[in-house]
Image (cartoon, rainbow, N blue to C red):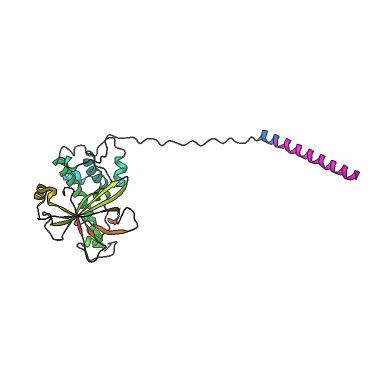
Amino acid sequence: MLKKITALMLAASVIIIAAAAIRSFSSSWTKRFPPKKTEPKQTETPAPIEKKNIELLPYSDTRLITSEEAAALSDQQLRIARCEITARHGKRVCSKETKKYFKSISWYHPSNNYDRASLSDIEKENVEILYKEELGRKQDAAKERLEEGKNGKDAKDLSSDYVDILTSFSYDDLSGKWISIEEDSDDTLVPKSTSVIEIREKDGIFYYVYYFVQIPICFTPEAAAEEGEASRVFCDCTTGLVTLDEDTGTITFYSGLSDEHPFFVFEYDVMSDRLIQTNDDKYQEIMVKNDDFKY
């Protein structure tokens, strides 16, 4: 029994001595190699975007742009110069490319109250001059691609061979009013009944409002404007989400405000500068841009 007690006391002494040695070693190690202090991570505040008070074509509201001046601009500059004219009056730019540019412009203040009527005749004509230059370049490129046989899409029996060509089309040009027309019709007349699609943006989301408008008499645009809303009978009105592939010119309209149920699909036809419905073999609606159409 005495031997067992002696052995236990000896073992306890060894444990106590070992623990003391470990504490001493740990303390010595800590003094020689102190732990590194972890600095709290600082969240960097992004630098504010420097606003610039510049204009690409500062004279585009006072004199007409010459064809030589328009031809000297790059494709991107053509788009920016055209948007610049309407942006001065508060029109919102829509495509990523133009948003990025105008975000850095100090005088750009988009407004929900933009009215095309606020543009002067010179400004309207300059918008048309710049647009025709940009459209002409796209059409030339489409002709080259058609000759090369590089359509890029499945060929369809549509009103234009060029609707199959992969053609860029921007949200800036898609936004606004589109009205349906009959192929080979006189575009100077307002049809007795027409579909109207208004494409708008809210918080970066694009949606459409679709109207089917019945007009008792086939007015010219001037006569229709004089008759006003009294001449129209609204037969239908729907709304939903709309998306655009800006690289290919494919526009998809959805039933409701989600992208789960495609409603109809249009392709941008660069040669006629129109939208052509492509998802219905029996009926093919053709839409033309007309922001001045009143209903």
Q: Name the residue: 20% across, 48% down.
A: 131
Residue 275 position, x and y percent, is 22, 56
Q: Name the residue: 22% across, 59% down.
A: 276
Which corner quadrant of the image does residue 194 belong to? bottom left
- Is 295 placed left or right of 200 in the picture? left
Above or below, 176 relative to 13: below
Magenta portion: prevailing SS class: helix
Q: Name the residue: 70% across, 34% down.
A: 27
| Along the viewing direction, whichever of 111 and 104 lies nearer the viewer | 111
Q: Is residue 31 magenta?
A: no
| Along the viewing direction, whichever of 170 and 112 lies nearer the viewer | 112
Whether residue 246 appears in this view of the structure is: no
| Along the viewing direction, whichever of 105 and 255 lies nearer the viewer | 255
Q: Is residue 2 magenta?
A: yes
Give the residues in magenta. 1-26
Residue 19 position, x and y percent, is 76, 39
- Is 175 placed left or right of 125 in the picture? right
